[in-house]
Image (tube, helix red, strand yellow):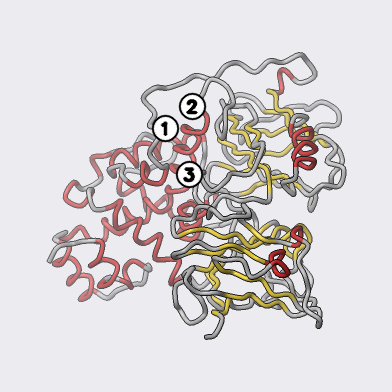
Amino acid sequence: MNFTRRSVTTGGLSLLAGAALGGAARADWSDIAGLGEGLDDFWLATDAYVYGYPLVTMEMTRRIMTNVAAPEGNRGPMGQFIRAREYPNASFRDVTAPNADTLYTTAWIDVEKEPWVLSIPNMKGRYFLLPMLDGWTNVFQVPGKRTTGTDAQTYAITGPGWSGTLPAGVKEYKSPTSMVWVLGRIYCTGTPEDYAAVHAQQDQFKLVPLSAYGKTYTAPAGKVDPTIDMKTAVREQVNRMDAVAYFTLLAQLMKANPPAAADAPALARFAKIGLVPGKDFDASKLKADFAKRIPQVAFDRIMLQFKINKDVQHINGWNFTTKTGLYGTDYLMRALITAIGLGANRPQDAVYPTSLKDARDDAYDGANKYVIHFDKGHTPPADGFWSITMYDAGYFFVANPINRYSISPRQNLKSNPDGSIDLYIQKDSPGADKESNWLPAPAGKFILMLRMYWPSENAPSILDGTWTIPEVKKVGA
């Protein structure tokens, strides 16, 4: 019997889920896998792979996004803001699951040598947030309307080993790692007038090294590395690394991006396979007879969490979790969110329920018509905003005659006589009188995503389960 992805996922479910097995079961799996006495070390190695998946993915993402001489499109050199100027259209294919609600204002910085100073302009009441991710994908700070208001504000992002005095009026945000991704989002309605207003605010965001704060500063040109693969998707690049290359890179990254103190028990175990914080990876301790199988099986373990992790909820055909942004020692959840939603916010800032099938487990199809019904006063409770986005089967926008890729209250939704609201999910127009409530679908399969930014923390709330997402019903079912 071959040790394939299918046999692992179907026959070894309890192993992949991390369940403890008795000696007899372990022996059986040893025979199936052909690993002899090395099965325990094999699962230990997959644990280490899962543990490091976020840090390796962040590094590969950083390399691609910053490998340009000057900001262009969705890329920019280290220490320089990338300012998205408009929402993508149906031809956009750079990243999956794009949004048509917020314009990104993002930057990658390295705070190992010195802090960087971030200046946020007066946002004049506009909804925004600037989550800061460390190398392990934890959102360690999140200035924004919810947390710090919309007045002008200035922060120094410092590294794990930095100590010193900051200029007056500058607040310290200490990063646990040298790698930092500032992943800002600014709400925009998408009209020409609002685009212009947001662009003016984006241009006032400043980022400079502490040594240049208060001085005239011109960002240097970025260094372009021609050996970096700029076309292959990050996840594919990470997943195709062999185990030795993967752990070698992980060990190197851990020197400037130290693990959390709570990780000590796990790291003590990983020393057996040659992974020790602060040291180069010792490949001699990784057994060659199973090394080539580690990436495939470890990634299967990660993706399996979507089905079996108790913190992933499945309600009325919608799937979501409120365990994002801060992960503690839940390494499998951290890796899962890295794989399917890198850059996810803390749940207090955003929750992203996604629906691939209806409540009857039937895939959505544009050959049918669907309705989402919200009783009066029961639209998604969010203090920021909410929207429902339409994607095709590949998680890209759907071309349609009215160029509408998401639907939200900014479409001036029409209510029914009783105050309830129906949203029409279908390929063809439901009629001129209902087009304000129409989310166009493709001819074939599609996927829906509900975005709730700053979800209400008071009942009804998705955070505590007092608000439930209604199902998407097929008309005539």
Looking at the rendered structure, the secondary structure element under dot 3 is loop
> In the rendered structure, which disc, 1 or 3, sits on the residue that comes first in sequence?
3
Circles 2 and 1: CB distance less than 8 Å?
Answer: yes
Circles 3 and 2: CB distance less than 8 Å?
Answer: no
> In the rendered structure, which disc, 2 or 1, sits on the residue that comes first in sequence?
2
Quick one: 352 or 324, which is closer to the camera? 352
Is 23 placed above or below 75 here? Answer: below
Q: Amino acid at mark 3?
A: Arg
Is 293 placed above or below 4 here? Answer: above
Please give the label number shown on residue 67: 2
Q: Amino acid at mark 1?
A: Met
Query: Residue 184 location, x and y as percent?
Result: 67, 42
Quadrant in which residue 363 is drawn: bottom left
Q: Which residue is mark 3?
A: 93
Looking at the rendered structure, the secondary structure element under dot 1 is loop
The residue carrying pointer 3 sits among few (fewer than 14), some (14 to 19) or many (20 or more) residues within 10 Å by Cα, namely some
| Residue under the point 47% across and 37% down | 59
Query: Residue 45 location, x and y as percent?
Result: 31, 53
Please give the label number shown on residue 230: 1
Looking at the rendered structure, the secondary structure element under dot 2 is loop
Is 185 placed above or below 106 here? Answer: below
Quadrant in which residue 455 is drawn: bottom right
